[in-house]
């Protein structure tokens, strides 16, 4: 939040004072429904299976992810993103590198399967989750490439400028970011029984290979000698290039730091599994 406040102060023309009212957008209804739906599913599971309740860590991850989306899409960040590239980059980072992995860590697919009636689960949900479309969408090479292409295309094609001029395109850009990020993180750290499942070493390599892509994107933005987007040149004047370099730095360092966090999570998971395996071996009876 210190970073966000600093960026907002840096971005706003005039005296830099500023947190205005939170934007009221239709996405708020989606966030509220996602929260209520989760609570309903948790209530149904806990009532029916009191000995196998939904872990609190899953609910915490889900609601933290929704909260990050709320901040990214409904707070003054969204208001100032139209006039500052660095604020816009903070918004993209919150969606793709914070909210999306938190939502994936919550394992919503597993929750949906557990909360659904057996007929719905066996007749509709499982065939969809194990079907060809989902397998194709969760193929690791596709999710990795899709996320990388979206990140680069969103910043170096006319899509970015169009999103600044059209609210509908801006919302579509946010949805594209979220969907590509959810698929990316589902492969990297997901626990839901859908599509392809990499082992821990595969997931580690998957994330490790993604780091240079995001770093290079940030570095390319930092290295630009001209302002990339006319909207920001008009809004910030002489400060536009500095703001652009700040945006590139946020992508470069922010994405790398968050990737390292999730790489550490995978290492911790591998160590935990190894300890469990060693305890099982130590506790198993020896045969003579």
Image (cartoon, grey):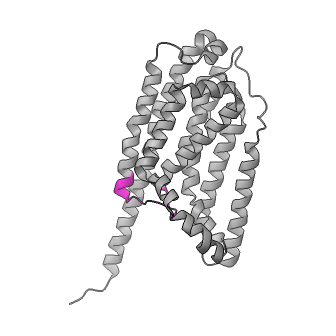
Q: Where is residue 169 in the image (x, y as percent from the top left)?
A: 66, 33
Residue ID at (36%, 67%): 275
Q: Which of 180 and 245 is in front in this view?
A: 180
Residue ID at (46%, 28%): 218
Q: Where is residue 206 in the image (x, y as percent from the top left)?
A: 38, 48
Residue ID at (59%, 41%): 176
Q: Nearer the viewer, residue 102 or 202?
A: 202
Q: Is residue 99 above or below residue 242?
A: below
Q: Which quadrant of the figure has residue 56?
A: bottom right
Q: Which quadrant of the figure has residue 238?
A: top right
Furthest toward the bottom, the residue is 288
Q: Position of residue 196 (x, y in %)?
A: 44, 59
The boundaries of the magenta stretch are: 190-203
- The C terminus sits in image quarter: bottom left
**Is residue 55 in view?**
no
Q: Where is residue 16 in the image (x, y as percent from the top left)?
A: 70, 19
């Amino acid at each position: 939040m210190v970073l966000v406040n600093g960026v907002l102060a840096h971005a706003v023309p005039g005296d830099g004072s500023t947190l205005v009212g939170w934007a009221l957008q239709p996405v708020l209804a989606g966030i509220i429904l996602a929260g209520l739906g989760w609570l309903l599913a948790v209530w149904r599971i806990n009532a029916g299976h009191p000995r196998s309740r939904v872990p609190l860590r899953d609910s915490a991850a889900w609601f933290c992810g929704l909260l990050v989306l709320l901040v990214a899409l409904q707070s003054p960040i969204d208001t100032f993103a139209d006039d500052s590239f660095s604020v816009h980059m903070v918004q993209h980072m919150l969606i793709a590198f914070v909210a999306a992995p938190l939502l994936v860590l919550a394992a919503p697919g597993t929750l949906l399967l557990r909360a659904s009636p057996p007929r719905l689960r066996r007749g509709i949900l499982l065939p969809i989750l194990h079907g060809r479309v989902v397998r194709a969408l969760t193929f690791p090479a596709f999710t990795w490439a899709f996320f990388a292409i979206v990140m680069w295309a969103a910043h170096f094609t006319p899509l970015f400028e169009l999103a600044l001029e059209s609210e509908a395109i801006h919302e579509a850009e946010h949805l594209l970011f979220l969907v590509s990020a959810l698929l990316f993180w589902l492969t990297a750290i997901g626990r839901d029984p859908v599509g392809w499942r990499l082992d821990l070493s595969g997931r580690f390599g998957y994330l490790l290979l993604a780091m240079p892509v995001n770093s290079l994107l940030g570095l390319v933005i930092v290295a630009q000698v001209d302002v990339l987007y006319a909207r920001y040149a008009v809004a910030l004047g002489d400060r536009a290039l500095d703001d652009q370099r700040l945006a590139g730095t946020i992508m470069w360092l922010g994405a790398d730091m968050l990737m390292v966090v999730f790489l550490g999570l995978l290492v911790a998971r591998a160590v935990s599994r190894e300890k469990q395996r060693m305890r099982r071996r130590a506790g198993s009876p020896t045969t003579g």
